[in-house]
Image (spheres, rainbow, N blue to C red):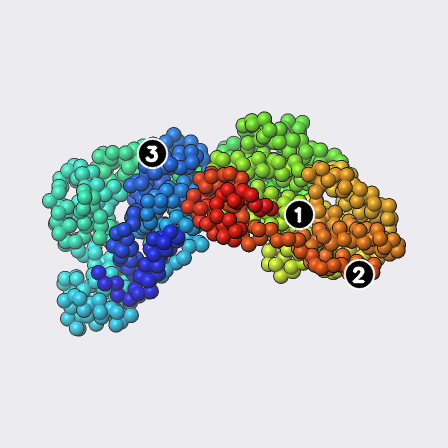
Amino acid sequence: MVLYGRDAEVAALDGLLGGARAGTSGAVVLRGEAGIGKTALLSHLARSAADMTVLRATGVEPESDLAFASLLQLLRPVAHHADSLPAPQAEALRVVFGTGAHGPHDRFLTGLAVLSLLAEVGDGGPVLCLLDDAHWIDEPSAQALLFAARRLTAEGVAMVFAARDDGFAAPGLVELRPARLRREEARRLLGELAVTPVRRERIIRESGGNPLALTEFAAADGPEPGPGAPLTATDRVLASFRSRVSALPDRARLVLLIAAAESQADVAHLMKAAALLGAGPEDLARAEAERLVEVTGGQVAFRHPLIRAAAYGSAPLARRVAVHRALADTADTPDGGALHRAAAAIGPDEDAAAGLEALAERARARGGHASAANVYHQAARMSPDPAARTARLTAAARSAGQAGLAARSGELAEEAAAGSEDPATLAELAYIRSFSLFEKDAVGDAVRLLVDHAADSPTRGADMVRTAAFHAWHSGDLDALRDCAARPELQGGRSPGDRAVQGLARVAGGDFTGGLPLLAGLLDEVDEADGAGADGIGSGHHARTQAVTGGLLLGDDHRLRRVVEAGIRRCRKEGVLGPLPFLLSVLGRLQVFAGEHRDALVTVAEATALARDTGLNKRVVQLDHVAARIAAVEGDETRVRSLIRTGPTIDGSHGIAALILLDLGLGRYEDVLRRIDEVERGGAWHSIASILACADAAEAAVRLGEPDRADQAARRFTAWAEARGGPWARATALRIEAMRAGDLAGYERAIETYRDAQGTPSARRPFEQARTELLHGEALRRARRTTQARAQLRAAAATFERLGATPWADRAHAELRATGASPGASASAPSSPAAALTHQELQVARLAAAGTSSREIAAQLFLSRRTVEYHLYKAYPKLGVTSRKELAGLDLS
């Protein structure tokens, strides 16, 4: 079969197949209008892949609300490979296949399982996945397939989606857009058909270069297309198909309508419904003879989706109702019966609505939350009883939120709230709506909604107030935070979370001594539960998130890191992706504090990829700010500015803090003080980023010779450090005091505090210690205690060089020269063997060196086993090794 005008597309797709045969992977979206040739290109791929495992699925409109319908269609031939997957992934796929126990699981786990399954199939040779009419793929299938597609690397898998312009958003995937045929290409195509020259030119003009329009107009009998109002090529082809359907005998049209109304293409199933209506196989044969459908292997397929649309759309309502009733009566699954009973209903119908509700419950139990939301919504529209309608809309809103469809969830919740006056129902809807508002940065609205309705919720009141309080903290709305702390739902401090809100409010009021111990209580509770292996508060993501948020304020890096790493291990073990970007962002920040910059960048790279793959774009800002702090330490102004967002929020304060540190390192002291003034006025001074920036402001003021200009900032940092009592925090407070007083003994006490705490992991903030050594060395040089100054300056310079903190290292070298000493050859510490590795190669190599198998690494990092082995293959020559045994002997720090 010749594909005219498609040389570029064919070359690109053939290249995709070649890559799969060579062991690499890729995914492409073919996008364009109906009839532009997407299906023809998929057929070309199928013919070219005779040596590959070819998996195919086609989205059909009647199945667009059946959870995992398309995924099941695609993977059914290789379902037996699921037994080889890690247990959580295998169970997620068994649920999809209908053989597993239904239960809640992370909505991204199915996508990871699809990736692993395709990699297992790829072990036996290259794999081609073809998904036609992707705009009609059910949402849970689409989410899983797109997650897998974005993480394909070295599995030998090629994945191609074909979709219309107005559906199937697939950000991050390569797109090919077949163009309309040029006139000469159209002539060549029509040259194969028996068309007169006059008619040929008319067809070329009327078709607009759409290949399907060209062939259908050429094949059509009867009069030529008329010159009336202009129609698109799709409309013209659809009209042509309607004409061909209308020309069929009555019973053949009926069978075609049954096939169009039923997503199951099994001939035997269709004939059961046809028999109820007086039609049979001979009528299907007539439609097949007219080349409107194809029957192969007991399956019926429309030659083009527009034929299905024509067959259904041209039938009168009464006949469509009769067909759906017949299909409901002969359905072999509860889901199919529910959909057809609903389609047959005219107006509100409680029986049909109840059937849809049961269908939605089944979808939800399988993890198909997006489909459940759509079906609940359909059930609500069909509900004659207003209370039932509201309940079903509420369930739809809840399911949409669980699917990560924040905007859709908010819209459904608003629709439900408009039809209810029940306070408890409105409170539940407020809780649901608050997450939608939070995701679109209307945090103040979310806080007010939660607080206004908390008293009306018999079960969620306290949780709503706690959630509002943490939202208020993150948004910098301290008045709202204090209002939450005063709410009756939290009085008496019944839980660590309640007491943590009181702690946040006290910190917001400047009472570190009273507030921080309350935050420590929540962190203690989670830490103790983790240590005991309990399934209580320690395992709850919501509680852990709040504990970690408060824990950042405590400055206890060691204990916070233990809690964060326990949460990360739990997520990796259970295949839970949703909480990971947040937990990894905090781990990255703690790694920066510990001077583990390379590790922090590895952490950030993994978390950013996960956040983008899973649509958690708000987390990307947090991760960018972790990387921005490293760039600020290094003095890389261009990178800092490309990464930060500023504003009166917790996330924004991290961006401002990165700028403050950058300005301090580059000697722009006035800018430091200007920015700290902005923090004071903006209301985000209470965040840990702003508290740390107070130490930077104090140093800038001293270097300007005006220490009083940062008096408030200095007092705030000292009050915070004394309230916590952590070694590195106390040492930094001593540094500030020594700077402002010009007290050499104060510097010595600060250095001693650092040295005494070297065995305490929470004290290891090497950059802060080096800054203290630099300032001490400068003060010693001014006091003409040259020998002692050199020792401090050399220690500072060595740390700055190891951290890549160029401006700070330059300052230490300049001070050394001022003492009459040579700084010596620069800097650099011996390069680690790991320096040449990419972030993911390093992550994989470290796990492999520790004896972790490829399959275990893949499960932990949410990759396929083949991708893990690909990264090891790339890492070995860079490290100068040839095996895992040699890898284990390397220092990969």
Q: Residue furthest right?
A: 783
Element at label 2: helix
Q: Residue 817, which numbered label? A: 2
Element at label 3: loop
Residue for badge 3: 98
Q: Nearer the viewer, residue 691 or 373?
A: 691
Residue at image location 26% in from the left, 65% down from the top: 4
Q: Amino acid at mark 3?
A: Gly
Q: Residue 669, which numbered label? A: none
Residue 71 image position (x, y, % from top left): 34, 43
Residue 245 image position (x, y, % from top left): 18, 53
Q: Is residue 844 left or right of residue 371?
A: right
Give the number of the mark in front: 1 or 3.
1
Residue 571 image position (x, y, % from top left): 51, 37
Residue 416 visible in the shown view? no
Q: Nearer the viewer, residue 475 or 825?
A: 825
Contact? badges 2 and 3 (CB < 8 Å):
no
Give the number of the mark in front: 1 or 2.
2
Residue for badge 1: 595
Q: Residues within 10 Å of mark 2 (few under 14, many from 20)?
A: some
